Image: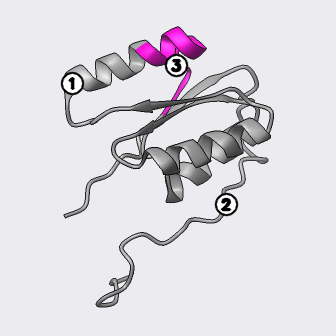
Amino acid sequence: MRRQPNAPNRAPFRSLDLSDAPQDFAGKVALVTGASIGIGRATALALARAGADLALGYHQDAAGAEQTRAQVAALGRRAFVVQADVSQLDAVTAMVGRVRGELGPVDVLINNAGWAK
């Protein structure tokens, strides 16, 4: 599907349902990059509803990541916001270290970070 001229670059992704997922995410730690909007946010919320605690990675949209964190927390799950440029190995290494320190080892990785020009 082609994007229409002058159409917004990011359309909101409303929801994602993991209720039929074969895996139980209770007690798991998930790291979702690009979690401040769209598919990343929807994925993080679906994992939270399925019982996971979340590390929410973002690059520039701190306010969006904080909104996602608040929504995850409202579902009764632990949530931690972490900034990183995933194109930089040192930043990713530091991000994973912070997540391990805050929530424990990462059980699930959703690499949703993207870049648009």
Q: Is residue 18 above or below residue 24?
A: below
Q: Is residue 31 above or below residue 93?
A: below
Q: Is residue 107 a member of the stretch shown in magenta?
A: yes
For the point 31% across and 88% down, the residue is 6
For the point 78% across and 47% down, the residue is 19
Q: Is residue 103 above or below residue 87?
A: above
Q: Which mark is residue 89?
A: 1
Tell me the kind of residue under disc 2: Ser
* N-term mark: 3 or 2: 2
The answer to whether the residues at label 3 and label 1 have Cβ atoms under 8 Å apart is: no
Residue 65: where, in percent of width, then height? 51, 44
Does dot 3 land on a helix, a strand or a loop?
loop
Crowd class of label 2 (few under 14; some 14 to 19; many from 20; radius 10 Å): few
In the visual, does 75 lie left or right of 103? right
Cα–Cα gap, marks 3 and 2: 23 Å
Give the quadrant of residue 88.
top left
Please state, as top left, top right, bottom left or bottom right, where the N terminus lies in the image. Answer: bottom left
Residue 103: where, in percent of width, then height? 59, 15
* N-term mark: 1 or 2: 2
Cα–Cα gap, marks 3 and 1: 17 Å
Residue 79: where, in percent of width, then height? 63, 30
Magenta stretch in the rendered image: 98-109
